[in-house]
Image (spheres, grey):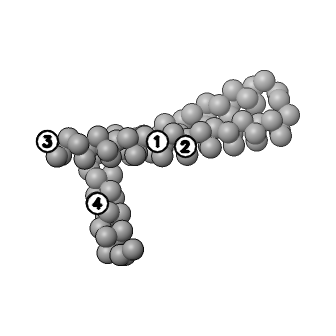
Amino acid sequence: MQWQRIWGLMLRYIFSFNRTVDRWVDAFYWPALDTLVWGLTITAFHIAPIQITMVISALILWYVLWRGQYEITLNILEEFYATY
């Protein structure tokens, strides 16, 4: 394992992240908006605090899994697009 290669890949993805506004919106705006909407919806139903915590935790876990899948797929697509 060579740390220079790992650092090179990290820099490449950081630079591509800063290149487009879409990635910033997908990474920060939509998760924050969904968390706010779900949090307000659940508190409007007067559900117990433990259930609110469970739903918000599930939403955060969903976003972690979804972002991982999305980033892997998008990077593979960009690699194929850049190759041809």
Picture coordinates of residue 48, whole percent (x, y)? 85, 34
Dot 2: few (<14), some (14–19), or many (≥20) neighbours within 10 Å? Answer: few
Q: In this rendering, is residue 78 above or below 46?
A: below
Q: Which residue is mark 1?
A: 69
Outermost residue on the left side: it is: 84
Foreground pick, 65 / 31: 65
Indicate which disc, 3 or 4, sits on the residue closer to the N terminus. Answer: 4
- Which is closer to the viewer, label 3 or label 1? 3
Q: Seen in the image, is 15 located left or right of residue 44?
A: left
Picture coordinates of residue 34, whole percent (x, y)? 57, 33
Q: CA distance from mark 3 to mark 4?
A: 19 Å
Q: CA distance from mark 3 to mark 1?
A: 23 Å
Residue 84 tag number: 3
Kindly tell me whether residue 18 is visible in this rendering: no
Secondary structure of residue under mark 2: helix
Quarter of the image where the N terminus is located: bottom left
Q: CA distance from mark 1 to mark 4?
A: 18 Å
Residue 47 quadrant: top right
Indicate which disc, 3 or 1, sits on the residue closer to the N terminus. Answer: 1
Indicate which disc, 4 or 2, sits on the residue closer to the N terminus. Answer: 4
Foreground pick, 42 / 61: 61
Residue 12 tag number: 4
User: Is disc 3 in contact with disc 4, using a CB cutoff of under 8 Å?
Assistant: no
Q: Amino acid at mark 1?
A: Gln
Outermost residue on the right side: it is: 48
Q: Amino acid at mark 3?
A: Tyr
Q: Which residue is mark 2?
A: 65
Indicate which disc, 2 or 3, sits on the residue closer to the N terminus. Answer: 2
Foreground pick, 66 / 48: 66
Q: CA distance from mark 2 to mark 3?
A: 29 Å
Q: CA distance from mark 4 to mark 2?
A: 22 Å
